[in-house]
Amino acid sequence: MTENASPNSALSSGQTSHAGASIVATNMTKVYGSGDAAFHALGPIDLDIKPGEFVSLIGPSGCGKSTTLLMASGLEPCTTGTIKVDGKALTKPLSEVGIVFQDHLLLDFRTAMNNVMLQQEIRGLDKAQTRARADMLFDRLGLSHAKDRYPRQLSGGMRQRVSIARALVHDPSMLLMDEPFGALDAITRTQIRHDLEMLWLETRKTVLFITHSIEEAVGLSDRVLVMSNNPGRIVEEIKIDLPRPRPAHLGEYPEFSAYAERIYKIFAKLGVYKF
Ligand SMILES: Nc1ncnc2c1ncn2[C@@H]1O[C@H](COP(=O)(O)OP(=O)(O)O)[C@@H](O)[C@H]1O
Ligand SMILES: [Mg+2]
């Protein structure tokens, strides 16, 4: 997908491009509500995510993955502890961030391109520059033919690709993804995993990626953080030492099975599976 890109059309070169941010959380906890209704959802947890790193959070439903992601975006404050992005404690929602949710959240009355260009309107960005970047993202995501289509005219995978373009068009320093491919079929998921990996290799944004899929976590990440629940904790950190780009069939690597087994074993120990 990138073969035709000239040096002038790179997504990550030049002074205008933002490098990945660091995300550091220390003793971070989240308690929702107060008094009798207080619910200790998360932590304490520590995070130390390096600029440009691709880190996945995997764990059972309700263990606090989305909470962690919202805290990394500044949308939810810490109850105790701190979270810092590029060394600065988060006290309000970050603007230098792109977020992709499981639901594409596209506006159905706007074309794919105009959904992405909404960022330019809202943020008051330069129109020509943002449009050029949007064109590049559509190219990398294999969507060049679909710019003028409306969301209802796109497949589920294409809608998520538009969401990714929207999340990256303002050149944020990090990308937060909350089960972005959870609603897609297995074949589409495998392709979009590869396309996201190629885009990440080109842009080197810091990515915090939430998934239920062991294959997706191992297939994409530099590091996988495995979480347990009640309250959510990080119980294991697994460094994924596989060459990139990674293949469609991860089983090509004997190491993949070893990583997957490690995660299954942790889940078994946590009682996630009752077989
Ligand atoms: N706004 C909220 N108010 C109260 N409880 C919440 C709120 N958001 C999430 N929770 C609870 O916190 C726990 C963690 O939720 P969440 O972060 O969404 O988990 P996950 O994304 O891992 O499924 C769950 O028990 C959930 O019900
Ligand atoms: Mg969630």
Image (spheres, grey):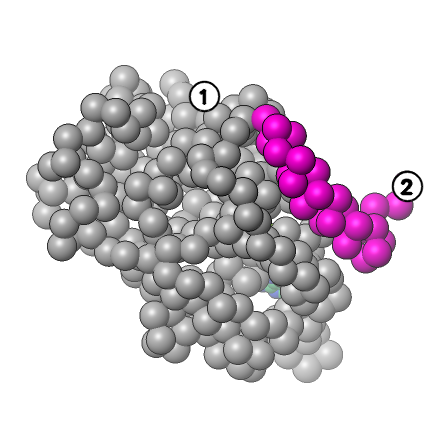
Identify which amino acid the numbered label 2 is placed on: Phe
Asked if the beta carbon under badge 1 is closer than 8 A to the nearest atom of ligand 2, the reply is no
For the point 53% across and 78% down, the residue is: 26
Rate crowding at label 2 as few (under 14), some (14 to 19) or many (20 or more) other CA atoms within 10 Å: few
Splitting the image into 4 quarters, where does residue 266 fall? Answer: bottom right
For the point 65% across and 40% down, the residue is: 255
Residue lying furthest right: 275
For the point 43% across and 66% down, the residue is: 23
Q: Which quarter of the figure is the N terminus placed in? A: top left
Identify which amino acid the numbered label 1 is placed on: Ser
Please give left or right for residue 274 compared with residue 12 in the image: right
SS of the residue under disc 2:
loop
Magenta residue span: 249-275
Q: Name the residue under label 1.
A: 155
Looking at the picture, tell me which residue is in the foreground, 163 or 53: 53
Q: Mark 2 points at which residue?
A: 275
Q: Quadrant of ligand 1?
A: bottom right
Magenta highlight on residue 193:
no
Q: How far apart are marks 1 and 2 (CA)?
A: 35 Å
Splitting the image into 4 quarters, where does residue 238 fall? Answer: bottom right
